């Protein structure tokens, strides 16, 4: 697919965020490459053009929601640098949720985003190959099939998120083009295989949930006998998955237990002081101890506990008042999709549910460091406004 001049910036934005998660480049340049990608996408959100009219009303909403997400850090006396970092990342997320209607507004743009992320993954794998950070191993306990491949990314969950996103984007592209033949199914199967090889059980579970959600209407339209057959086989598969999760994740894999332990310890602490409950504990998370955010919170919540859940992340950085912003955003998504076509309404609802469920295991919905969140927010906003046939037109 040829890239027109107007499509170069979206391509570069998603490409830069993707390669910024590479193990070698991340260690070499920190978050710089990711922030460059975010900056490119923010320019697209606020640069007025014939295709994109910047709304004063929506801009005010972005600033208001950003204030809700960052006010706790300033009130709690969080170090100045961390306060502005929380404010800027919150501003970026809210902008993607409310102002990104032209970034992924067409099928061509959806495919361009998928290509950008794919070539970002290829580039990361190439860098990993020549620097010894590819992350390929046989006989790994972290992978269901014993083969682990993280394509040069920092951790397996980054890699799993990339393949999950490519699976979803290509699925949507094929679905909206009414083209889901043998070739397209093979491509989707390949991305599912890469999710398995990444060792990210969260990404694998989310991909299964996506398939179920996006085909839910078709399932409801099955004939009575077909439904019985589907329920029978779906029940068998669900039981097998349940047994596998119990035996291999809840018992033997310690990471999720640590996440739940972290959540339990955090809630116990927050309930002791309403100020912490409403405004979060970013002052503790970003305290000048010489350690990172993650290390500070692990030491505070109990060593080896985890903060890799969106719902924990919000409580830590923003407090209960931060939840208001995300509730308003997702409410806006669900009310906006009512005017979409049947296909796009199904896509938007499925994306929203996947994002909400991902909050139980990952920080996709609240982080700009994963490419998953920015892409999904831009995609949902683009689908809603494309189907309305207009962009918000309160021009500067």
Image: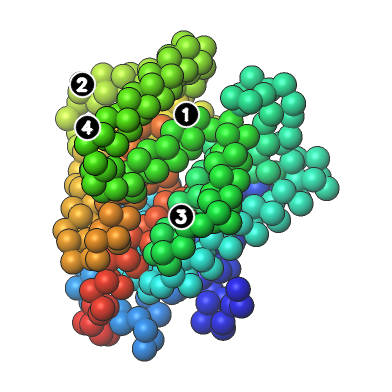
**Is 335 on the left-hand or right-hand side of 43?**
left
* Residue 136 percent coordinates (x, y): 73, 34
* Residue 25 percent coordinates (x, y): 69, 50
N-terminal of the pair, mark 4 or mark 3, is: 3
**Label 4 sits on residue:** 277
Choose between 310 and 166: the one closer to the eye.
166
For label 4, count other residues whose C-alpha is less than 10 Å away and answer few (under 14), some (14-19) or many (20+).
many
**Label 3 sits on residue:** 171
Secondary structure of the residue carrying numbered label 4: helix
Residue reaching furthest to the right: 130
**Disc 3 vs disc 1: which is toward the camera?**
3
N-terminal of the pair, mark 4 or mark 2, is: 2
**Is 192 on the left-hand or right-hand side of 336?**
right
At a point 47% along the width and 29% down the height, the residue shown is 296
For label 1, count other residues whose C-alpha is less than 10 Å away and answer few (under 14), some (14-19) or many (20+).
some
Quadrant in the picture for residue 59: bottom left
Contact flag, marks 4 and 2 (Cβ < 8 Å): no
The span from disc 2 to disc 1 (Cα, nearest Å) is: 20 Å
At a point 64% along the width and 19% down the height, the residue shown is 141
N-terminal of the pair, mark 1 or mark 4, is: 4
Residue 191's place in the image compared with 196, above or below, is: below
The span from disc 3 to disc 1 (Cα, nearest Å) is: 39 Å
Secondary structure of the residue carrying numbered label 1: helix
**Label 1 sits on residue:** 296
Contact flag, marks 4 and 3 (Cβ < 8 Å): no
For label 3, count other residues whose C-alpha is less than 10 Å away and answer few (under 14), some (14-19) or many (20+).
many
At a point 27% along the width and 30% down the height, the residue shown is 228
Residue 46's place in the image compared with 126, above or below, is: below
The span from disc 2 to disc 3 (Cα, nearest Å) is: 46 Å
Q: Which mark is residue 272?
A: 2
């Amino acid at each position: 697919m040829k890239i027109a001049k107007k499509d170069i910036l979206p391509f570069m934005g998603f490409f830069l965020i993707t390669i910024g998660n590479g193990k070698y480049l991340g260690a070499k340049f920190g978050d710089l490459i990711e922030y460059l990608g975010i900056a490119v996408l923010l320019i697209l959100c606020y640069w007025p053009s014939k295709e994109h009219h910047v709304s004063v009303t929506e801009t005010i909403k972005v600033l208001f929601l950003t204030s809700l997400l960052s006010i706790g850090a300033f009130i709690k006396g969080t170090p100045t640098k961390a306060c502005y970092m929380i404010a800027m990342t919150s501003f970026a997320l809210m902008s993607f949720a409310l102002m990104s209607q032209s970034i992924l507004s067409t099928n061509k743009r959806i495919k361009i985003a998928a290509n950008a992320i794919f070539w970002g993954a290829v580039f990361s794998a190439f860098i990993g190959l020549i620097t010894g950070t590819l992350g390929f191993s046989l006989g790994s306990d972290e992978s269901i099939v014993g083969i682990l491949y993280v394509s040069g990314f920092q951790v397996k969950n980054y890699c799993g998120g990339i393949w999950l996103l490519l699976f979803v984007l290509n699925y949507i592209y094929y679905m909206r083009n009414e083209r889901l033949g043998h070739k397209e199914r093979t491509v989707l199967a390949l991305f599912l295989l890469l999710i398995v090889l990444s060792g990210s059980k969260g990404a694998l579970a989310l991909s299964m949930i996506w398939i179920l959600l996006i085909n839910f209407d078709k399932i409801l339209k099955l004939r009575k006998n077909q439904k019985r057959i589907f329920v029978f086989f779906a029940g068998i598969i669900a039981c097998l998955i349940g047994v596998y999760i119990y035996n291999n994740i809840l018992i033997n894999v310690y990471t999720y237990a640590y996440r739940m332990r972290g959540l339990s310890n955090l809630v116990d602490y927050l309930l002791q002081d309403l100020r912490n409950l409403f405004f979060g504990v970013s002052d503790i998370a970003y305290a000048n101890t010489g350690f990172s955010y993650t290390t500070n919170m692990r030491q505070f919540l109990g060593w080896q506990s985890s903060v890799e859940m969106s719902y924990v992340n919000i409580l830590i950085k923003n407090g209960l008042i931060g939840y208001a912003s995300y509730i308003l955003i997702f409410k806006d998504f669900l009310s906006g999709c009512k005017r979409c076509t049947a296909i796009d309404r199904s896509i938007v609802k499925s994306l929203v549910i996947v994002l909400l469920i991902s909050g139980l295991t990952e920080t996709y919905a609240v982080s700009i460091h994963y490419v998953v969140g920015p892409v999904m927010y831009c995609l949902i906003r683009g689908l809603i406004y494309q189907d309305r046939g207009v962009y918000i037109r309160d021009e500067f």
